[in-house]
Image (spheres, helix red, strand yellow):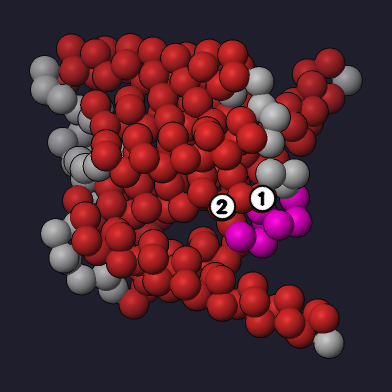
């Protein structure tokens, strides 16, 4: 019986949070309609992040807030090619604040935020110099700063680097299904950042241990 109650509460919470994520993305996308496919994807992502937060993390509330930030920011960028910095600041501050309550080291979070921001700021200026236009959004720089502030120094670096591998995988998939992309194609980068940040947030230690085993036996 307790298991049934748990499943019912989980389902209700997931439904409410999914509705919140979809409504927020739609609001900041200037009311543009969210397709059933995108709504289904957002719902699945919400359920997956909730399940992971409750089953694989020792700070579930912070993980839920962080995952909500990732889903909303990634969804808005996918729809509008714009990162709404206000939501990033608010969500990032909430996630970091709750993470501190769980006992995270403040200095590690500060270093993570500064490193993530500085690394992507460098990419921003290099891309702007190469393409002679703003090819890499400044909102992405702010977003990575927030991600690093939550993940900390080493995990923030890992998420920063993993983003490019995730983006490469999706670009290859787009090429396979026939979606044509050129150098002038405007790419929403925040969804890839969100996916990478969530993977590192939940499985960061496992990824690092796996790398150490392969690298050093």
| Helix, strand or loop at mark 1 | helix
The answer to whether residue 6 is left or right of residue 20 is: right
Region in magenta: 50-56
Q: CA distance from mark 2 to mark 1?
A: 6 Å
Using a 10 Å C-alpha cutoff, classify the residue at mark 1 as few (fewer than 14 neighbours), some (14 to 19) or many (20 or more). many
* Residue at 81% across, 80% down: 3
> Where, by quadrant of the figure, is residue 207 drawn?
top right
Task: Depth check: give the residue in front, 40 or 88.
Answer: 88
User: Residue at horizontal 50%, vertical 75%?
Assistant: 15
Query: In the image, is residue 55 part of the stretch drawn in magenta?
Result: yes
Can see residue 163? yes
Callout 2–callout 1 Cβ contact below 8 Å: yes
> Hey, which quadrant is residue 13 in on the image?
bottom right
Quadrant position of the N terminus in the picture? bottom right
Q: Residues within 10 Å of mark 2 (few under 14, many from 20)?
A: many
Residue carrying label 2: 64
Q: Residue at x 78, y 31 (%)?
A: 210
Q: Is residue 206 magenta?
A: no
Q: Secondary structure at mark 2?
A: helix
- Which residue is tagged 1? 60
Residue under the image location 11 percent in, 18 percent down: 132
Q: Where in the figure is residue 97, as x and y percent of width and height?
A: 53, 34
| Predominant SS of the magenta segment | helix
Q: Position of residue 80 (x, y in %)?
A: 19, 51
Horizontal and vertical percent position of residue 177: 37, 60
């Amino acid at each position: 019986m307790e298991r049934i109650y748990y499943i019912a509460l989980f389902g209700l919470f997931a439904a409410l949070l999914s509705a919140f994520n979809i409504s927020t993305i739609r609001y900041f996308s200037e009311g543009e309609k969210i397709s059933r496919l995108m709504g289904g994807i957002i719902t699945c992502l919400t359920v997956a992040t909730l399940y992971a937060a409750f089953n694989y993390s020792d700070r579930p509330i912070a993980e839920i807030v962080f995952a909500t930030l990732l889903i909303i920011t990634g969804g808005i960028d996918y729809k509008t090619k714009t990162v709404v910095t206000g939501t990033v600041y608010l969500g990032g501050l909430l996630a970091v604040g709750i993470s501190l309550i769980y006992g995270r080291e403040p200095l590690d979070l500060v270093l993570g935020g500064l490193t993530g921001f500085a690394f992507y700021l460098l990419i921003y200026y290099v891309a702007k110099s190469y393409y002679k236009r703003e090819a890499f959004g400044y909102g992405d720089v702010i977003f990575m700063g927030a991600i690093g502030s939550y993940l900390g120094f080493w995990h923030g670096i890992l998420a920063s680097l993993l983003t490019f591998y995730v983006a490469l995988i999706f670009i290859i998939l787009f090429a396979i299904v026939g979606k044509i992309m050129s150098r002038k194609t405007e790419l929403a980068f925040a969804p890839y950042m969100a996916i990478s940040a969530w993977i590192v947030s939940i499985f960061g230690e496992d990824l690092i241990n796996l790398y150490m085993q392969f690298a050093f036996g």
